[in-house]
Amino acid sequence: MVAVLGFSMFFGSLTEAYLRREAANRARVLEEMASSLLAAVIDDPRWTVERAVFVAWKLANATSSNFSFAANGHPFQVVVLDLAERRTWMFEVGEPVGDHRVASAPANVIARSVDPARVTATVWGR
Amino acid sequence: MSHDGFESFVDAIFLLIVLFAASGVMLTRGLVSEHDPRSDGVALAGNLRLALFRTTLDGLGYRQGATDIEVRNGTTVETFLRLEVHLLRNASGDVDFGPANVRIGRIVARLLPSGWSGSVFGGLVGEPVVVQLPAITPSPDRFESRWAYAPVHGVGPGTELGVLVWLSPRR
């Protein structure tokens, strides 16, 4: 009976540890993807003049497909919000279902002036 | 109890202890997180400082005595805060930066992601802080990014500006 109890506890713990580790790995992968996506947006010289400084008219030419590579085929959404002018640029691909992770950073948008802005990158995964 | 029975009992207890310890180790290892949340705070403080200080504002000004003084449009928050620290430390008479400080404090709050609080501070190097926006007490468990500048008139101590960020407790 002691052996049955002991082994039940052992294999129960083994299963739970595996599930926890898998969930943690999945969350870590999503976090890394969200961070990579954010970095791809704020570092791209096609619409920034330096890190996290966007040029409004250049950002208007960006498309969702410009960012797809950083999300590895997962559904994603990138939002650049100009906090002064209340303008939003949104890029999204796929249906937003399942677990998700968000990475965001303060930024600026150059329009008539240098406005404060916030960039948010969200990646979904099952 | 016979010798064999006692030996089996000890073996069973030993097995139970070993399995119990192994289960504990597995569960603990399953919870280990390799991500260090402090790196998020340090990065956020640096990014917030850059985004805030690069921001330009129109219609910023202050009141000195009975006179309203407006700085030129397109002045960066960084330049304005340096001026504010300089005047609060050196100007004679009352200097009021109230409305401009409220605007800057609001920008700080809006730049931060949800779940974080923060403030911007300024003072002369080696002296107590004379500007803190918004005027809230920061958490002792906070992250900081600061920058030192040459003195406004080229003499005396330099100016230091920075930002503090900390995780807000859920309400």
Image (cartoon, coloured by chain):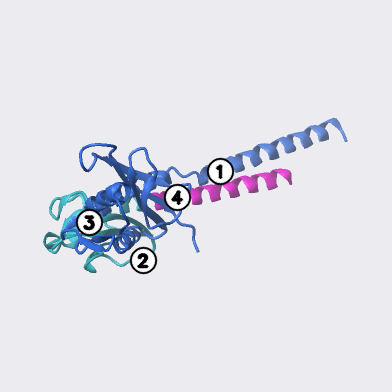
Chain colours: A cyan, B blue
At label 3, the amino acid type is Thr
* Residue labelled with disc 2: A97
Q: Residue at x 34, y 49 (%)?
A: B44
Magenta run includes residue A21? yes
**Callout 2: few (<14), some (14-19), or many (20+) C-alpha neighbours within 10 Å?**
few
Q: Secondary structure at mark 3?
A: loop
The answer to whether mark 4 and mark 2 are in CB contact below 8 A is: no
At label 1, the amino acid type is Thr
From the viewer's side, name the closer residue of A34 and A48. A48
Q: Which of label 3 and label 1 is nearer to you?
A: 3
Q: Residue at x 39, y 51 (%)?
A: B165
Q: In the displayed structure, does residue A12 sit left or right of residue B50?
A: right
Task: Chain letter for mark 2, please.
Answer: A
* Residue labelled with disc 1: B28
* Residue labelled with disc 3: B55
* Residue labelled with disc 4: A24
